[in-house]
Image (cartoon, rainbow, N blue to C red):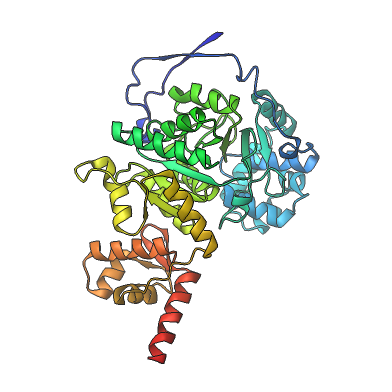
Amino acid sequence: MSEVIFQEVDGSRDLIPDHRITDVRRPTRLRLISYPTSMNPVKSQTNAKNPVWDESRKGWLGCAWFEKTGPASLSKLQSGFGQDGGMQAFAAKREQWLATGLQPNLTDEFMEWRAKIEPDALVARLAQDGIDFVLPWDAGYPAALRQSSSPPAALFWRGAHVPAKICVAVVGTRKMSAYGQRATRDIVAQLAARDACIVSGLALGIDAAAHEAALDADAPTVAVLAGGLDTNSLYPRTNAPLAERILLSGGALISEFPPGTACLKHHFPQRNRLIASLAKAVVVVEAGQDSGSVLTAKLALDEGREVFAVPGPITSQTSLGSNLLIKNGAHVCLTGDDVIHEAAAASDAGGEYERQLSKDERKILDLCRTPTHADDLARFLNSPSAAVSSACMQLELMGALQDAGGHVYEMTAKGQRLLKARKEETKEA
């Protein structure tokens, strides 16, 4: 045994995510076994997920390591230079980067950073930390991500493959109640009995309870992080032993961020999108009205995933978000079987929800042929903002509308089909 002391972050509170632990004044003393650590990392469990490090792969690693080359920028480089052009992209001249559509400031900063970097050293760093590097064309890249609207251009990975079975995300508040903890454990145990893989975010509260319940049921579980996967970057550090247990039990840690990246507040929406894309369904156990878990549910809707919520006391602020999801059309989740049955039914039916659109819903879809802000919708419809927001949420749950960001809504292809079908019905009548 070796003893590791983790000092929680203090100062710079504006960069600390909302679901950090609350007491940061004293170091948290954690006892970890020596496997895995940066000195003794978990070995990759599959050659399919860990291809040979040729020059192109080293180049893509270098491009992905730069903190400002996010998924959109990296995708542009991959489109411009091709699958085998990683080293050409890494070593490219300024005008070649600009030709792919990248911004001048980003390009100049990368060129300056690149002069200090040796890709072979980055490869060695991954090996030291037991981390794999997965690209979209690799065999180990999850099929669910390939089918998403914005597949990550690169992943950092510790542990096993995501198993070829249904993945269900279970998320919720860090301020978990005894009710939420019991509901999480019961639902996850039932999902595990149906051979589901549990996906969550390793946060305190519901996320940690979901991972622990999966491990107790001998089910695979995947933790998606908003920072680096190396031991020193794991967040929250209180859950470092849980991360280790996930790895030792055949699970995985996944991130879009390279080793050494701190978990910053603005990373969490990207983490939530990855959780939503990996899962066939998302279960929100307890969540505040504007919580990250509600955001994950909305991202899941954008990806055509099924959304479930566990009802909670109407007097509980931590159940307000989940109760509102149900009010606006999310599936009620009372047992794990509810999730399995509904997800299977949606797959059989192609995910279509065939209820009739209301008059206001048809008007909203008609207005959202181009991106339209919720405030403008309320003004055009002469309706209260709360009523418009509720209708937009219901249309999102149907997959007919999507939030493009900042409460700006746009009709989806399904919304166009539903609106067209309604107009055809009106003509026939």
On the image, the x and y values in percent for residue 341 come to 47, 53
Q: 313 or 186: nearer the eye?
A: 186
Q: Which residue lies furthest to the left in this view?
A: 315
Q: Residue at x 37, y 32 (%)?
A: 205
Residue 398 relative to residue 110: left or right: left
Tell me which residue sits at (58%, 52%) in the image: 72
State left or right for residue 28 relative to residue 109. left
Residues 306 and 261: in front is 306
Q: Residue at x 30, y 77 (%)?
A: 359
Q: In which quarter of the image is residue 96?
A: bottom right
Q: Is residue 199 above or below residue 427?
A: above
Q: Could you say where residue 120 lies in the image, as x and y percent from the top left?
A: 75, 31
Whether residue 117 sits left or right of residue 183 in the image: it is right
Q: As drawn, is 217 to the left or to the right of 153?
A: left
Q: Residue at x 65, y 30 (%)?
A: 131
Tell me residue 283's x, y (percent).
41, 46
Q: Where is residue 153 in the image (x, y as percent from the top left)?
A: 63, 48
Given residues 425 and 370, the one toward you in this image is: 425
Residue 418, by quadrant, is: bottom left
Decide if residue 304 is in sight here. Answer: no
Residue 386, placed above or below residue 283: below
- Picture mark count: 0
Q: Of residues 266 and 305, which is closer to you in this image?
A: 305
Instruction: Examine the rendering and report whether any part of residue 151 can be seen.
Output: yes
The N terminus: image quadrant: top right
Give the position of the C terminus as an image quadrant. bottom left
